[in-house]
Amino acid sequence: MGQGQSKDELLYQQVSYGNTEGIKSLHRDGAGLEWRDKDAKTPLIVACMNPHLYNVAKTLIELGANVNAYRPGRHGGTPLHHAAKRGFESIIKLLLVHGANPLILNDDCLTALEVARAKGHGCAVRTIESHLCLFSGWLRELHG
């Protein structure tokens, strides 16, 4: 273990390296998935900010990371907000399939859909909209 670093911090570091096996191993040894850096980013938020870390995001979610973890501040939001801001369609789909709430507002009072729309990420917008349509259709059918 690094000098003065907790297992949680080491797991967080493995995210940026893309080391899914290291993440799994540290988690088995008791490392938490919700450690936050000085900017309040969780490991999952970091993974959702880089399209090359899709497998890391998937691993973290499978291990139980909170898909709705919230990072406060002007550039904050949930992992979904961060993926939508960058137009990472595959990560957006992954988050939505695993229960990410597309209706959460960030500190600018915007949903992930509105963030994607403002950034001009048409594919991300359609991905979130189609998820919302499926959800609202299911809700209509269930509750009349």
Image: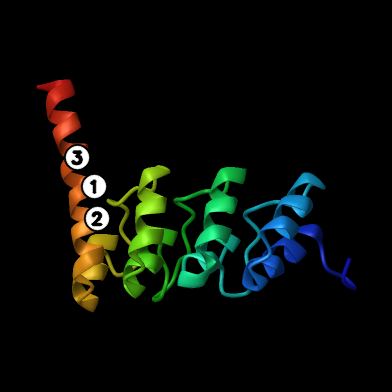
Q: Secondary structure beneath disc 2?
A: helix
What residue is at 54 percent from the left and 59 percent from the top?
A: 55
Q: Nearer the viewer, residue 55 or 42?
A: 55
Give the labeled residue for mark 1. 131
Locate residue 46: give its quadrant.
bottom right
Task: Tell me how far mark 2 sits from mark 1, CA to CA.
Answer: 5 Å
Residue 114 appears in the rendering: no
Using a 10 Å C-alpha cutoff, classify the residue at mark 1 as few (fewer than 14 neighbours), some (14 to 19) or many (20 or more): some
Q: Residue 134 bears which disc, if any?
A: 3
What x and y, as percent, mark residue 116? 25, 69
Task: Tell me how far mark 3 sits from mark 1, CA to CA.
Answer: 5 Å
Residue type for callout 3: Leu
Q: Is residue 53 left or right of residue 140?
A: right
Give the labeled residue for mark 2. 128
What residue is at 36 percent from the left and 64 percent from the top?
A: 81
Q: Point out the image quarter for the N terminus.
A: bottom right
Residue type for callout 2: Ile
Using a 10 Å C-alpha cutoff, classify the residue at mark 2 as few (fewer than 14 neighbours), some (14 to 19) or many (20 or more): many
Count of all numbered marks drawn on residues in the image: 3
Please report contact status of discs 2 and 1: CB closer than 8 Å, yes or no.
Answer: yes
Q: Nearer the viewer, residue 43 or 38?
A: 43
* N-term-proximal mark, 2 vs 3: 2
Please report contact status of discs 3 and 1: CB closer than 8 Å, yes or no.
Answer: yes
Q: Secondary structure beneath disc 3?
A: helix
Q: Is residue 68 left or right of residue 21?
A: left
Task: Tell me how far mark 2 sits from mark 3, CA to CA.
Answer: 10 Å
Q: Secondary structure beneath disc 1?
A: helix
What x and y, as percent, mark residue 15? 64, 66
Q: Is residue 104 left or right of residue 13?
A: left
What residue is at 42 percent from the left and 43 percent from the top?
A: 98
